[in-house]
Structure formats: C-alpha cells, structure tokens
Image: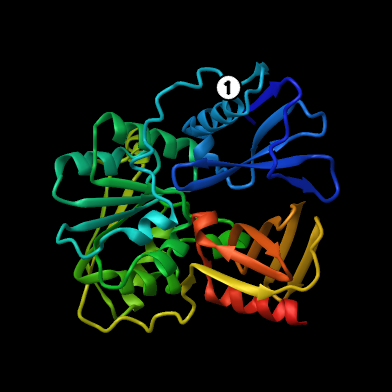
Amino acid sequence: MPHLYVAPLKIPERHWCHDQRDSKLFRAMDGEETFFIRLDPSGKMIRLSLLTTNIDLLLNRHKRILYNFARRMNAEILKSNLGNFLKDERGLFNLWNEKKIASFDWNTPSPKHLEIGSGNGMFLNAQAKRNPHCVFIGTEINGFVLKKALRTAATGSLSNVFYLRKEARYLLRYLIPENILDAIHIYFPDPWSKTRHHKRKLIQPTTIENFARCLKHGGSIFFTSDDVEYATEAKELFEKSPCFNLKTYEMTTSPKIYTKYEKKWITEGRIIYSLSLQRNDFPSPPSSSDTIIESFTLLAPHRLKSDTIFQKDDFTVIFRDVYRGEDEDLIDAIVTLGRTIWFVLFSWREGKLHFSSELNQKFLSRRVETLLRHLFLA
C-alpha cells in the first residue's frame, strides 16, 4: 500500500478521528472526485483510505494525490514507497466509473459494442483502432490486466474505447440503457466447472434476459469457449430464449486470433467452440423495478460504531470504520444484496444517514435504499 513517512504533521482544522483507534482522516480532492488521507496512530505515516479503488492504485493516481497532499500541508517527507510518483498516468481518459457511464450520451449514432471480460484489451483495442466510428466498452474485474488494456488504449490514442472495473451482470442490469447495444462479445468466460461454482457462470437465464434488454433488435452476440460442456450449455440456454436466433455454431482449431486466451488455446491445439446469435423482434422481458439511485437520506437517530453488522435474509450491511467529525461522521461500509457487493462511504449528521453518488462516484440500488430504511426503522 503506498504511503509517506512525514515529520510530525500539523493537523488540518477539518478532520475526522476513528471511534476506536487513534487514527485520523483528512479530505483530499482530485478534480471532481473526493479522496481521503489517513494518518496512522504514530502520527508519522499517511496513506490513501476509503474511496481509493485498486485500479486507481495501479494507475499511479494515488501517488500524485498523496504527494500533493503532503506538499500542501508543508509536510517534511522522511521516507516513502511511492517510487517514480511523476510517472505518466496513462489510461485515465479510457477508464470509466459509474458516474461517467451514466453521463455518457447513449443517443449518438455510433454503433456500440460491449465486451464482457475484456482482459488485457487485445481484442477491444484492436477493434477500436480498426473502427474509429464505433464505440467500444469493456468490463473487466481483474485490475492488473485492466491496467494493461488502459495503457495500450492510451498508447494508441484511442478515444473510442472505454473500460470499467464492474461485474458484468451489475453493468447490464443497472447501468446500460435498453435497446442500445449493437453487439456483445464474450470470449472465453470462466466455465466455473465445479458444481458449487455453477451459480457464478455468466450465461444464465437472467443474464440472457439482460442481453435481450440491452441489445437493439438485429444486434448480435458472439460467444467462444474452449470448454465443450459450457459451450453446449450456453447454446441450449440461448435456444430456449425467444429473443434470440442462433446464426452459427462452429468448432475449429484455427479461428482468427482475437484474444490472448484464443492464441494460447490454439497453440495447445484445443478445439474452440463459437456461437453467434442475433436479437430478433420478440419483446424484451420486463425491466427490473430495482433501479439505481444517486442519493438518499435516512433517519438514523443513534450514532453508529465501527465493526457493527446488520443482517436480514440475503441483505447485509457492515459498518467497518467510523470516523467522528465536528459536524458529521464518515462511515466506511460494505453492503451486500445476494451476490452484489457495494463498497460505500456514508455520512451521518444530525440523526440522519446520507448517501451521495457525488462522494462515492457510484450508485446504490433503490432496493438497497428501501432495505436500509426498514433496517433503521426496526
């Protein structure tokens, strides 16, 4: 974790103190985004806290924020592990968060493609370079390979490809509008072969419904796998859906090399199974009533404490760390609903709990807001 050792720091007037440990929190801004700096109990080490995501860490953004904070506080830096903190932050333009995807103009006439599990961006960046009139969106949860995709996009000055570090089902359900995508690409998804992992498979009836909702009529899905059982299962599930027509189902050992894994499996002589499907005119399944919400306020008359857990059925809220301030508390929380997880920063003041997408650069679902409201009423 990046950090700086500094001479005893002059504490800013506005700060927050942990309710159980002797550590303090300070606010730092980077453009429109808010970050927080944590001072450890020794009073000498500072590091980024709370809203910093792993992909931010990989892009060296954390180094600049931390260094600029120390310089602004006139702190004497004794030691650091920042390395070359002036290294170019390549890829930030091509990195989307929930706020950025929500503000994107989806009504532009450019064809829009989504790749699920874009990895190091080998396919998506190549397609973006060949088709500058199209918009390409990739989702990848592995921050290390996503960093490579972002830097390759930046090196190629690609302005029509964007990446998110989001779970695909969440992206399709909450963030992509209806009837907007021209194509969805799914290349070598994890087959999750063990029985206890089957629920993690991407291709499931509910996901296919979201594919149908997001795709334009006439839009396409391209799916490949080296796992014959998964390919067969995916084919059968798509054939059961009234929203898709199967165009091709092929088996080959020498397809076009689009992705890193395709190249690897071909070298090993594996058979590649490919599906292509077309969205027909059958009406989309009804949209979920659970939509995303930008901000809300709940009655919470009692101050919360660190390491507090609330749980009801498949809904859990963990208030990990609570920092007390002069006029508000900051609460670092984990919210889970089924298999969906949100890392959230709440604020508490005058007997009310507040959530804001401006602070978090992300949204919560309306169902989570309702469950939280019931939780506090109880």
Residue at image point 67% right, 68% down: 353
Instruction: Specify whether 251 is left or right of 202.
Output: left
Instruction: Please tell me whether mark 1 sits on a helix, a strand or a loop.
Output: loop
Query: How far from the left and from the top, in percent, is residue 215?
Result: 27, 69
Instruction: Specify whether 11 is left or right of 185.
Output: right
Q: Quadrant of residue 123?
A: top left
Instruction: Specify whether 134 is left or right of 358.
Output: left
Count of numbered badges drawn on the protein: 1
- Furthest toward the front, the residue is 13
The residue at which mark 1 appears reads as 82
Instruction: Specify whether 269 is left or right of 57.
Output: left
Residue at image point 27% right, 40% down: 125
Tell me if residue 256 can be seen: no
Query: How far from the left and from the top, in percent, is residue 201?
Result: 49, 61
Say which of 248 and 167 sits in front: 167
Q: Quadrant of residue 87?
A: top left
Name the residue type under label 1: Leu
Tell me if residue 73 can be seen: yes
Above or below, 94 against 244 in this view is above
Query: How far from the left and from the top, in percent, is residue 268?
Result: 38, 34
Query: How far from the left and from the top, in percent, is residue 48?
Result: 63, 37
Please state, as top left, top right, bottom left or bottom right, where the N terminus lies in the image: top right
Say which of 31 and 173 sits in front: 31
Say which of 325 and 321 sits in front: 325
